[in-house]
Amino acid sequence: MKNEIKKRVEVSVGIIENDKNEILICKRNKKGDHLYGLFEFPGGKIEKDETPIDCLIRELYEEVDIILSTSTTSTATATTTPSPSNLSNHNSMIKLIEIVEFEFKEIICNIHFFKVNLQQNIKPKPKENQPMFWIKKTELNYLQFPEPNKDIIQLLNQNKI
């Protein structure tokens, strides 16, 4: 059997919490899409020369119309991957929770999970015809998420993030 090197993909994901302690989730509804029918936290692939924070800012705008600026995030350089230590001295609106490596059948994915606390005046809306829901943390266990999300959901349920 031929050993093939799997493609590596870097992804940024936002765990978005509102002032009611609800979490924003979306449902993948494009047929034929990877992970079709599963729920997910908003986010996407990190592009070339993009930091995980820059990707998060772009993806949240593209998917759910949340506008974050670099003044609400870390000013990490393009050559530096944010870590909890280099984000801790910045505004607490966005915080890196964990980086999870997961091997799918076709790819290896490094997922940068960020916690995003929304101010009351920010109202997300879906921009990619993807269903969007606010849900209580305790209800996350009853929905189908991609495998790499399970540890994050457990931490949310334990109020550790």
Image: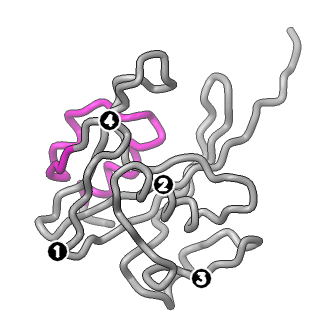
> Looking at the image, is mark 2 or mark 3 earlier in the sequence?
2
Discs 2, 4 touching: Cβ within 8 Å = no
Disc 3 to disc 4, C-alpha distance: 31 Å
Q: Indicate the position of residue 64 as horizontal and vertical percent values.
A: 34, 52
Mark sitting on residue 129: 4
> Looking at the image, is mark 3 or mark 4 earlier in the sequence?
3
Q: Indicate the position of residue 118 as horizontal and vertical percent values.
A: 27, 71
Mark nearer the viewer, 3 or 4:
4
Mark sitting on residue 59: 2
**Viewer-closest of 140 and 63:** 63
Q: Of the residues shown, which amino acid type is indicated by label 2?
A: Glu
Give the answer, above or below, for where 52 lies relative to 140. Answer: below
Q: Of the residues shown, which amino acid type is indicated by label 1?
A: Gln
Q: Of the residues shown, which amino acid type is indicated by label 4?
A: Asn
> Looking at the image, is mark 2 or mark 4 earlier in the sequence?
2
Q: Which residues are magenta?
A: 133-158
Label 2 SS: helix
Mark sitting on residue 120: 1
Q: Residues within 10 Å of mark 2 (few under 14, many from 20)?
A: many
Mark nearer the viewer, 4 or 1:
4
Q: Is residue 101 left or right of residue 21?
A: right
Label 3 SS: loop
Q: Residue furthest right?
A: 2
**Residue at the image point whose x is 58% and y is 49% from the top:** 11
Q: Is residue 77 left or right of residue 16?
A: right
Q: Of the residues shown, which amino acid type is indicated by label 3?
A: Thr
> Looking at the image, is mark 2 or mark 1 earlier in the sequence?
2
